[in-house]
Image (spheres, rainbow, N blue to C red):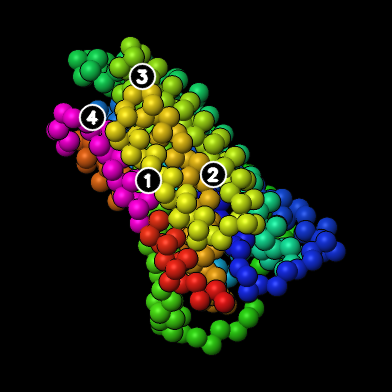
């Protein structure tokens, strides 16, 4: 998942002069560059996939709920594989974890070839699950691996630099979805497709699946090349040689008794759910808005994805602004303010509708920009050693919020029958609820957990 950042303002930490410390030693520069590339690679996978819910819904003529199984398979891989990844890294090394992640990522992408040939929905779900299992290994490995590549004094700066490449991959993924998938699919809308003969429908479906699959196969080949390169280049193993005297029961027991961490995992579940809902169903929302203005369904979907790209650009810019604000505002306070903004813009998305509701939906990305890393950093503050490894895995596993919450939103879209609001507008009550929970966590960090930072 995108944009981990552990640089949390903490008054108990002494200031450190890093001016004399190198960011990355020359001997590790190539290793650093290769691992940093992985940040962009998983950003690409995350953000090419969100628009695919609408694409599969159109191709297979499914309901929104059925099409959302794409997100269940995709983010379910994160939730199920984070802890196995932590165990794997603990036993072997960070580099081994990277190679395992790249291998699974490549396998998932290349599986789009047989899935497209079979022409059924469920093989694609298997491919997505395998692909995102690789992403879970990558994220669990790459962040601490980058931290280990140089002096401890510059570790956070090193990680921030690597993270800067994640949005580049995200924007490339969004652009690919817009220009090389949605724009190249058959322009016939759902209603027209339903009137086609079985032979005509199969021909259209096969052509669209080939269009959809091609970028995934290409990225699969790129990942194979990256796997070979990392395997052949001499890199530090990143293996943690420190002794561990605690059993897993003791580790999880200590984590369970840390309310700030437990509540952080819960907040992270709802943040990821909100992010995926806003970036997935912006396609549905925008299609509804632009078709009401007279656009055809295909053009409306492309225009909606263009707004999604704008939302990602706003997300990236806001991330830098919020990172700057952390110098002056405590993280819990900033989190609370960002969540309040998310609440207000979600209300605008629900009640305004039309193009102004679309503007509010795009604006939510500004509020989400630093939520994940802020929650991540607050929750991990003061947790060290093996406790930190499994605590971090728990926060990666929280990405499972991207499975059941979008599915709930799809259920609202499919079942809503009140005329005062459209089904799509009403469904954004779920992201609103998520931001309320995140705001509550920020409040508790400021007013209840404050002494834990002293």
Q: Spatial distance from mark 2 to mark 3, Cα to Cα?
A: 28 Å
Dot 2 surroundings within 10 Å: few (below 14), some, or many (20 or more)? many
Q: Spatial distance from mark 2 to mark 4, Cα to Cα?
A: 32 Å
Q: Nearer the viewer, residue 235 or 148?
A: 148
Instruction: Give the label on residue 290, or none.
Output: 3
Q: Helix, strand, or loop for circle 1?
A: helix
Q: Spatial distance from mark 1 to mark 4, Cα to Cα?
A: 19 Å
Label 1 with label 4: CB-CB less than 8 Å: no
Residue denoted by label 4? 422
Q: Is residue 426 left or right of residue 22?
A: left
Residue range corresponding to the magenta coloring: 415-437
Nearer to us: label 2 or label 3: 3
Most common SS among magenta residues? helix
Instruction: Give the label on residue 43, or none.
Output: 2
Dot 1 surroundings within 10 Å: few (below 14), some, or many (20 or more)? many
Instruction: Give the label on residue 292, or none.
Output: none
């Amino acid at each position: 998942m995108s944009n981990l950042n552990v640089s949390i303002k903490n008054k108990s930490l002494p200031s450190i002069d890093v001016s004399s410390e190198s960011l990355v030693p020359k001997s590790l520069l190539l290793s650093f560059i290769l691992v940093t590339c992985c940040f962009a690679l998983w950003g690409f996978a995350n953000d090419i996939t969100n628009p695919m819910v609408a694409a599969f819904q159109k191709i297979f003529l499914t309901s929104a709920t059925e099409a959302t199984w794409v997100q269940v398979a995709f983010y379910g891989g994160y939730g199920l594989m984070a802890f196995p990844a932590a165990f794997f890294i603990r036993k072997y090394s960070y580099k081994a974890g990277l190679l395992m992640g790249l291998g699974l990522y490549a396998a998932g992408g290349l599986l789009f070839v047989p899935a497209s040939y079979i022409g059924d929905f469920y093989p694609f779900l298997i491919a997505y699950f395998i692909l995102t299992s690789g992403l879970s290994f990558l994220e669990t490995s790459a962040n601490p691996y980058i931290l280990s590549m140089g002096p401890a004094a510059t570790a956070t700066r090193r990680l921030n630099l690597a993270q800067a490449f994640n949005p580049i991959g995200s924007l490339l993924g969004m652009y690919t979805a817009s220009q090389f998938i949605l724009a190249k699919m058959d322009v016939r809308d759902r209603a027209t497709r339903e009137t086609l003969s079985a032979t005509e429908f199969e021909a259209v479906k096969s052509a669209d699946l080939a269009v959809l699959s091609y970028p995934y196969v290409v990225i699969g080949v790129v990942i194979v090349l990256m796997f070979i390169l990392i395997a052949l280049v001499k890199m530090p193993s990143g293996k943690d040689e420190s002794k561990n005297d605690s059993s897993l029961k003791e580790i999880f027991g200590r984590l369970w008794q840390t309310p700030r961490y437990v509540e952080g995992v819960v907040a992270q579940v709802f943040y990821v759910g909100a992010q995926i809902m806003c970036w997935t169903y912006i396609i549905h929302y925008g299609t509804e808005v632009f078709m009401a203005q007279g656009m055809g369904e295909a053009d409306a979907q492309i225009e909606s994805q263009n707004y999604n790209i704008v939302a990602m650009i706003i997300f990236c810019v806001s991330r830098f602004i919020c990172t700057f604000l952390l110098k002056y505002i405590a993280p819990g306070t900033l989190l609370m303010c960002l969540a309040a903004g998310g609440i207000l813009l979600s209300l605008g998305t629900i009640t305004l509708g039309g193009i102004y509701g679309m503007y509010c939906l795009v604006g939510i990305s500004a509020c989400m920009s630093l939520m994940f890393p802020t929650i991540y950093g607050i929750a991990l503050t003061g947790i060290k050693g093996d406790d930190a490894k499994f605590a971090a895995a728990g926060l990666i596993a929280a990405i499972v919020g991207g499975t059941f919450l979008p599915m709930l939103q799809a259920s609202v879209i499919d079942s809503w029958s009140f005329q005062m609001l459209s089904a799509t507008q009403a469904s954004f009550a779920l992201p609103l609820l998520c931001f309320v929970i995140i705001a509550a966590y920020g409040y508790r960090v400021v007013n209840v957990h404050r002494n834990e930072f002293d």
